[in-house]
Amino acid sequence: MTVFDIVCGLLLAVGAWKGWRDGIIVQLSGILGLLVGVYLAYRYSIPASRWLGSEGMTGQAAGFLLVFGLVLVALALLGRLMRGLFKFAGLGLFDQLGGAALGIVKVALLVSVLLGAYESINLTRHWTDGEKTERSWLYRPVKEAGELAFPYLRSLKEQFL
């Protein structure tokens, strides 16, 4: 077991705990809020800036932030309401278990992206040798999980390295 295994294991445990605490409904509404919020904010930043009475880049930025914030708050509230309905319907345990699983997946994907960046930098900086990564229990599974989720990262890495 390496230091990476300990750190990665702790991060995965925190992701599972946060997912268990929030539940899958709240986590999915947060992810959806980010995606929908960015899309709607991009699409309606100019009309929102006019509504605010501000023109130019500052107005567009303010409009973007306003729309993005409103969408995030609306979907967060909707997620909390849906979580309450899940609990009322007796599906609270399903919500928590799904949340824990989604929390682990989110952290694993984040760590895998960071590992890809680390490997690219390590090719020129030589911070660690391959022996340390081979001894790690979690390095390869987490890295491969990211490559499954983001297959274009491998081709991008091969293209630039």
Image: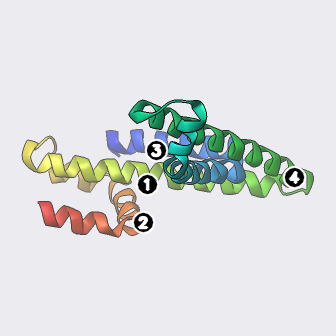
Which residue is denoted by mark 4 in the rendering? 85
Q: Nearer the viewer, mark 4 or mark 1?
A: 4
Q: Is residue 93 left or right of residue 11?
A: right
Q: Residue at x 23, y 69 (%)?
A: 155
Measure the alpha-carbon separation of dots 1 and 2.
Answer: 8 Å
The answer to whether residue 25 is above or below residue 72 is: below
Q: In this rendering, is residue 89 above or below 53?
A: below
Which disc number belongs to residue 109?
A: 1
Q: Give the quarter of the figure containing the C terminus.
A: bottom left
- Mark 1 surroundings within 10 Å by alpha-carbon count, few (fewer than 14), some (14 through 19), many (20 or more): many
Determine whether, in the image, residue 46 is placed left or right of residue 82.
left
> In the rendering, at what x and y percent does residue 148 appear?
39, 69
Measure the alpha-carbon separation of dots 4 and 1. Answer: 29 Å
Query: Dot 4 surroundings within 10 Å: few (below 14), some, or many (20 or more)?
Result: few
Q: What is the C-alpha distance between the residues marked 3 and 1?
A: 13 Å
Front of the two marks 2 and 3? 2
Point out residue 77 in the picture as x, y percentages from the top left corner.
75, 42
Q: Amino acid at mark 3?
A: Gly
